[in-house]
Image: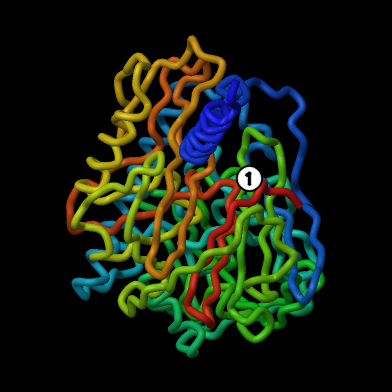
Amino acid sequence: MSLWPYSVFLLLFILLTSSNANNEQRLHLKRLQRTHQSNSPSCYSQKSKSENGATILEMQHKDYCSGSVTNMNRNHQKQLIVDDDIRVRSIQASIKNIISGKIATLSQTKIPISSGVKLHSLNYIVTVTLGGRNTTVIVDTGSDLTWVQCQPCRLCYNQPEPLFNPSVSPTYHKVVCNSSVCQTLQSATGNSGQCGNDLQDCNYVVSYGDGSYTRGELGQDHLVLGSTSVENFVFGCGRNNKGLFGLASGLMGLGRSDISLISQTFETFGGVFSYCLPSAEAKSSGSLVLGGDSNTSIFKNSTPISYTRMLANPQLVTFYFLNLTGVTIGGVAIQDSGFGKSGMIIDSGTVITRLPPTVYKGVKEEFLKQFSGYPFKQGVSILDTCFDLSAYEEVNIPTVKMQFEGGGEMEVDVTGILFIVKSDASQVCLALASLQYDDEIGIIGNYQQKNTRVIYDIKQSQVGFAKETCSF
């Protein structure tokens, strides 16, 4: 009997299964279900190292470290989504105010300081040394001003680390009111620096849309990132801080304005940084890499790095804008005339990616075509495409890829496609949402950036993506 027909059949089978494997990913639901952890470790005073001219800081999930990834019941998960919606509405309102030329006063500002700080389980922290003391801060690309809680404090939330005390740091000094540094607050926070009672302090305030805020004065001190020293680093010394900032001592601003950490360390790191955000469920560490070549070998990426250019937006200098040109679901390209017409913000703090309404409609329809046969469940807040997967140990879900101008592409990790609302998987939703209006700006959230090396190269004005299983 001839073997030719069998060999042809075998070849076709291999090609078909290979294609299917590239367009689908297997999600193990039981591994993602969040369970009580009685002895969650402390992640404060995390590790750091230097390789090939780059400084690498260990990055971990804030609430895994603090032990608050416990009993993640449906009410808590629903609140996360509601709070994320509040944060995005606040961003959109702030953008409209900036574009329209409105200047907020010290008491009126509602610009979100934390880009998801209120979302208890979806922030990432690193440890730095400020004024000789280790300090654990939340990492945020959607903010510019780095700040910590300071003594004496009129109103501070609880934190396990001692409050920063400028009076015992020999290298600390205040930023003088009306100085050029003080004036950079306008672009970084939406407020001009105001003089304190002694006409010397440069006061700042940054408020979040839900009422969280930090207030204090600008100071300068010696900052150490790994083994790299930064002299006269400008930061906010918070005397009045309120909100759910978790157990972190403050926030690290990685935005684009002159007062951000990236701008202040430009001569040292060349405006290059990257991160790999680990899944909370994986109990693993990621990394924040400062400096080095943007194609450096210190990354552990499993796919080549693909780049897209940053879009210039002189009115919105804090944010990083990219041009989204396409989305594929299971290898099928979504057809929509809205691609490539306006920029998308990539943000390490916003949780759920927001797409223009017509783009989201196409994504949702194609996803439902390919992810069929599962019982539907009522939506929750901004997530309107939900399923009851409680009867399944694992499911195959179509791959989701985002294409950007110039050939850049980000493949969403399998853990970033579905959001488990109920811990028993009886309510699991597509982790994408629609903007309310066509004229709003889309946002690429951190839930879709997990297990991806995201590289920001300010000097070359480009952002790169590669798949990477996060580790330190």
Q: Looking at the picture, which amino acid does disc 1 mark?
A: Pro
Could you say which is closer to the camera, residue 300 or residue 195?
A: 300
Left or right: 302 as drawn, with respect to 398:
right
Left or right: 112 as drawn, with respect to 181:
left
Q: Quadrant of the N terminus?
A: top right
The percent position of residue 334, horizontal first and vertical second, equals: 28, 47
Q: Which residue is mark 1?
A: 278
The percent position of residue 142, horizontal first and vertical second, equals: 46, 61
- Tell which residue pokes out farthest to the top in this image: 391
Instruction: Tell me, yes or no, if residue 70 can be seen here.
Output: yes
Q: Secondary structure at mark 1?
A: loop
Q: Residue at x 29, y 62 (%)?
A: 94
User: Hey, which quadrant is residue 382 in on the image?
Assistant: top left
Is 35 situated above or below 172?
A: above
Q: Residue at x 48, y 54 (%)?
A: 410
The percent position of residue 154, horizontal first and vertical second, equals: 56, 56
Is 385 situated above or below 375?
A: below
Could you say which is closer to the camera, residue 53 or residue 107?
A: 53
Q: Residue at x 50, y 78 (%)?
A: 202
Could you say which is closer to the camera, residue 172 or residue 412?
A: 412
